[in-house]
Amino acid sequence: MFTINKSKVAFTAAILTGVALVASGCASSDPLAPETEAPAAGGETIVIGSQAYYSNEIIAEIYAQALENAGFDVSRDAFNSGQRDAYIPALEAGEITLFPEYSGNLLQFFDPETTARTADEVYAALPDALPEGLSVLDQSTATDQDSYTVTKAFADENSLVEIGDLANVTTPLTLGGAPELAERPYGPTGLLDTYGVTVAFSPTADTTVEALLANTIQVANVYTADPRIQTDDLVVLEDPEGLFLASNVVPVVSGELPDGAAEIINEISAALTPEGLVALNVQSTVDQESTPDIATAWLTENGLI
């Protein structure tokens, strides 16, 4: 007669029970499994960089907080990475994952001879100009580029919306800006050739906005994200003919972002406007608010966190 060795059965059952418990501990569907912290969305760290420039760092911080709010692991170690000669190699090497850039300046960095000028032309040219491994997400309407700007009073008095409207002003016009503007292709000669606008030139340099407010010049070469556009009630004239190289805020990606991250950044680009970027810069330079606080408030106001 075959007899059962009860001790062996008990031993074997104990082993099988232990294996089953270990296996069940690894299965997330088992209600008896110990709770473990959920991995960050995408399962990898997104290293975000920024230029050593308060406006660019604010945008980078907006990216970072939005991604963190969605559960992604984010590193800010590449904030304040200097200028393009310093951070572009880090992007190409994959050391930085995501960077807020400016479309026109980025295009000229890789293609100095580009003829693209308008926002759509520049954005369309970027994919072919960027090296392998780098790509761009959706661009924003927000810009940080050269412009021709007037006071609101002067714009209202002369019905000015576009640069070309300056040709209808009946009083003499003086353009102010950095001394080298006199020889730039978008300076007085470019104004005449592109829009038929004749101006005198005054090298106002660092006092350009002050000269504009004093009416010693009527047109000023001002960057479109300058906080003084808001604080001094200035009007940036539209440039439909692309006299200036368009430089819209555009996110640059090295490699591929984890699933779902690109959609978050594209939502930010859709919400960031030229006036909105100026307002963010005012909060930094005039109101002296911290970059994290500025970013949190903007994301909250726009329903993104």
Image (cartoon, grey):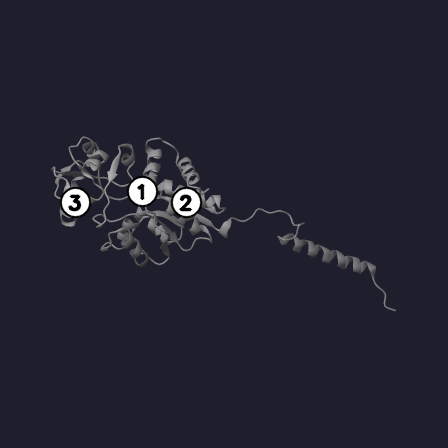
Q: Secondary structure at mark 2?
A: helix
Q: Which residue is mark 2?
A: 63
**Closer to viewer: mark 2 or mark 1:** 1
The quadrant of the picture occupied by the N terminus is bottom right
* Residue 187 marker: 3
Distance of label 2 from label 1 (alpha carbons): 17 Å
**Residue 39 x %, y %:** 54, 49
Left or right, 45 with respect to 23, comes to left
Left or right, 97 with respect to 122, comes to right
Indicate the amino acid at tag 1: Pro
Indicate the amino acid at tag 2: Tyr
Q: Are marks 2 and 1 in contact (CB under 8 Å)?
A: no
State which quadrant residue 161 falls in.
top left
Distance of label 3 from label 2 (alpha carbons): 35 Å
Answer with mark 3 or mark 1, whichever residue precedes in sequence: 3
Q: Residues within 10 Å of mark 2 (few under 14, many from 20)?
A: many
**Residue 284 x %, y %:** 35, 34
At 18% from the left and 38% from the top, the residue drawn is 158
Indicate the amino acid at tag 3: Gly
**Residue 174 x %, y %:** 14, 38
Q: Which residue is mark 1?
A: 274
Question: Which residue is more in the foreground, 250 or 162?
Answer: 162
